[in-house]
Every structure is written in C-alpha cells, then in structure tokens.
Amino acid sequence: MRSRLLLGILLPVGVLVAINTVSLYREALSAVDTAYDRTLLASAKAIGELLGVAGTPQGPRLLASVPYSALEAFESGNSTRLYFKVIGFQGEMVSGYDDLPAWHGKLPDRSKYAALVDFYDDFYRGEPVRMAVLLQPVAGEAGIGQATIQVAETLDLRHALARQVLLDTLWRQATMLAVIAGVVWLVVQRSTRPVRALSELIEAREADDLSPIPAPGLPTELQPLIAATNEALTRQARLLEHQKRFVRDASHQLRTPLAVLKVQVQSARQGDVEPMQALAEIDTTVARATQVANQMLALAKAEQMRQQGAQSDAAMPLQDWSEVTRAVALDLAPLIVQQGLDFDIDTEPATIASHEWALRELTRNLLHNAILHTPAGGSLRIQLALMGRWARLTIADSGPGLSPAQQARLFLPFASGDSQSGSGLGLAICHALVMSLGGRIELCNRVDGDGKADGHSIAGLDARVDLPLS
C-alpha cells in the first residue's frame, strides 16, 4: 500500500514538474532571444544613424562610412562576434562583409518592434548566426531612399546562457521534487503507521487466538476492516467450538454402544448366550450406533450451514416442500401402519430455496418423533399451508406432549427425555436446519376443548415450522 501511495502521488507530481520544467525553459529561452534580438536591432539602428545620401536628386546614392568600432559596444566579450552589411538604394553593396548571406525573406505582418525589421537564423562561415535585417529610410540634400542593413551575431553566448538557464531550472525543479517526495514519504509513512501496527499485532497473535482484535485509536477507514475481521474471527471461533463439541459428543455417544458391542461379542464367543440371541443384540447395538453416527453427521452439517449463514435464493436450488413431505410420509408409512395410527396429510405446493436433503432431514425428524410419541391407535396429521410469504408445516400428534423439564431443554443436543426412544439429536438437527434456512420452529402442547393446560388436558403436540417462500 505504501508503494502504491508513493507511486500514485509522486508519478503525477513528477510528470507535472517535468512539464513545468520544459515550459519554464522555453519561456526563459524566449526571454533570452528577445533581449538579444533587441541588442541586435540596436546595433542595426546604430549603423543606420551613420548613413547619408550623396549624388544628385536625379541619382541619389547611399553613403556609408561605418567603422567596425561602432559595433564593439554591442559585443559581449570574446564569446560573440558581430558582422554587418549595408545595401544601397539600388541593391548595391555599400559597406560591411560582402559575403554575408543576402536577405530573401519578407517583413512580418505584425512586429513587436517599432522598426521595419526581420529576425531569422542562418549560417555564416560555417557557424550558426542570428540575423537582423533593418529597412532604414535615409534622407539628405541629394534625395531620399531606403537602405537595407544586415547584422549577424554568433550564437555562442546565447547557447551558453541557454545551458545555464536549463541547469538553473533543472536544479530548482529537482530540489522542489525532492522536497515534495520527502514530504509525501513522511505523510505516507505516518498515515500507514496504524496499518503496520495492526499487521504486527495480528502477526504476534497465537495460532489458536480467535478473540476480537482490539482497535482503539485506529483511523475511521480501518474500522470496517476491523469489524469484518472480528466478525470472521467470531464465526471461526464458533465453528471451532462446534467441531470440538462434535468430537466430544461423538466420543461420548459412541463409546457406550461400542463398549456394549464388545461385551456382546465376548459373550457370544464364550457361549454365554444363544447365537441367534447374540446376533439380535449385536444387530440392535449396531443399528443404534449407526443411527447416532448418522444423526451426529447430519447435525454437524446443519450446524455448518447455520454458522455460514443462509445462502441467497440464486445460490440455492428450488424445491417443492409438498413433494418432499409426501415422499417422507411414504418412506415412514410402515411405521405409521405398525402403530395403527389415524393418519391424515394435506399439503399445498410451496417452493423453498433449499437443498433437498435439508428439507427431507427436517421433515423426517419431526415426523419420526411424532410417530414415536403417538400411542397406538392415535391420530397423526400433517398440514402444509401457505401463509403470505411463508410456508407453514404443522405435524400434530396425539402424544403426551412436552413436560416443563423438556420444554426448558428444547432443541439442545442429547436432550431426549426417553433414552430408549432416541439419542436426543433429532430436534437439534431440525432447529439448526430451520435457522440456516431463515425460518422459525416451535413445539407447543395442544390442549383439549376446555382450554385447560393442567397436564391432564393435553391432547397432543404441534410441531410448527415456518420457512420463507422463494
């Protein structure tokens, strides 16, 4: 992040400084050229002041007597040289350097000088020169005419001054860029100090430390990150606790049937019981251990779904809960027939965003519990109805209902009131599945017609599950 901040800040600043440097250099060169061009124009005017007119009014001719010493005042030491050439009224050579290149240009349409002058670059005697051409009117007793004055200056001094201007500009801009870079680096270092401190704090934590990260004094921008991280740590802590509890419960619940199974096998091998009786007992123990293992795996999967949170409808397949309910009832039909129950089922199509195994496991556990707790010849009713944006499954049995002790420990694992009827995991699985699907579940006693609930008027138990429709 520090590298990106530094690059993101210094790169645009560096580009702007480079553009500014080029602009300043060009402006400085323009100012230098303007100053030296004025000097060159002044030298041409100085020559024009020394011109005169001779001859007759019918044939005036230009008279020039210009000593080179007249230009010495405009020379800058030994680093530059001036050359001049004066051309008469008829284009004849009058004075100066005859081999100076002739002017073939034209005067500019607009000029910033109060004179008929043209400036251009040329070469003379193998070196570059700056040329000024001045059209100078000359009047005298013999007549009037226009002289052409050319003055050329070597560019050594201009180049030297341009290099000096460039070096001065680069030095100042480099100093400014260094100051900006230093300030930016300090600001970025100071701004990212909380991030580095947070990184060191997290790195120093123990591998099993899932406690929330303290965030006193951290910038506001980091608070959402800390909150999200703490939420993730909390979920991980819950998952880890669930895994530990699962291992602890599994070892506790499977230890007893495995010990019983070992004793039964030893008794069978020693001949203490009849072989068929021993096999029957072993089969019962294995079936119970298998049921406990399957239910614990289902509870672990349901708890995992619950801890991860309900998934969106787009990520979950759509299931018709009525079809799942009827399929579960058909699977458990032999138990219903065996109990001789008065069974009734009434369902409406209800589309739920869920995995099929979750709906099947939820419905199977509730219906199986209802069958086990309904006395022989009793009544059992299943109803699946739509209630607005919810689907409600009601399984009503005619059993003894729930005691106050059972209601206090409802939906807790291994909280079965009857050790012979099951492992006590069924309702815990149902609760975890309903919570993962964003629904509600409740088990309440159903009283008889007089409305009393004194323990003698309980007509059965209603298990109600509400799940949101897709």
Image: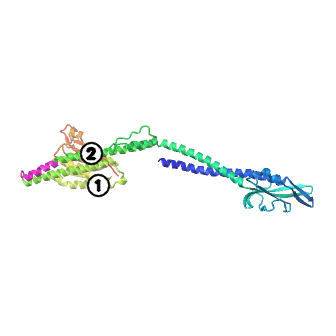
Residue 347 seen in the figure: no
Type of amino acid under label 2:
Lys
Q: Is residue 251 magenta?
A: no
- Residue at 31 percent across and 55 percent down: it is 319
Q: Is residue 260 magenta?
A: yes
Identify the residue under disc 1. 356
Q: Position of residue 110 (x, y in %)?
A: 76, 55
Q: Position of residue 439 (x, y in %)?
A: 31, 47
Q: Is residue 108 left or right of residue 385?
A: right
- Density class for disc 1 (Cα within 10 Å; few <14, some 14-19, many ≥20) is some
Quick one: SS at disc 1? helix
Q: Main secondary structure of the magenta part?
A: helix
- Residue at 28 percent across and 50 percent down: it is 301
Residue 216 or 382: which is nearer the viewer?
A: 216
Give the label, 1 or 2, closer to the camera.
2
Residue 183 or 382: which is nearer the viewer?
A: 183
Residue 194 or 172: which is nearer the viewer?
A: 172
Identify the residue under disc 2. 244
Q: In the rendering, which numbered label is found on residue 440?
A: none
Residue 154 seen in the figure: yes
Say if 137 sits above or below 205 in the image: below
Quick one: SS at disc 2? helix
Find residue 106 and report its image quarter: bottom right
Query: What are the residue bounds of the magenta stretch?
Result: 257-272
Residue 218 or 427: which is nearer the viewer?
A: 218
Q: Position of residue 116 (x, y in %)?
A: 80, 55
Say if 95 sits above or below 212 in the image: below
Q: Position of residue 163 (x, y in %)?
A: 66, 52
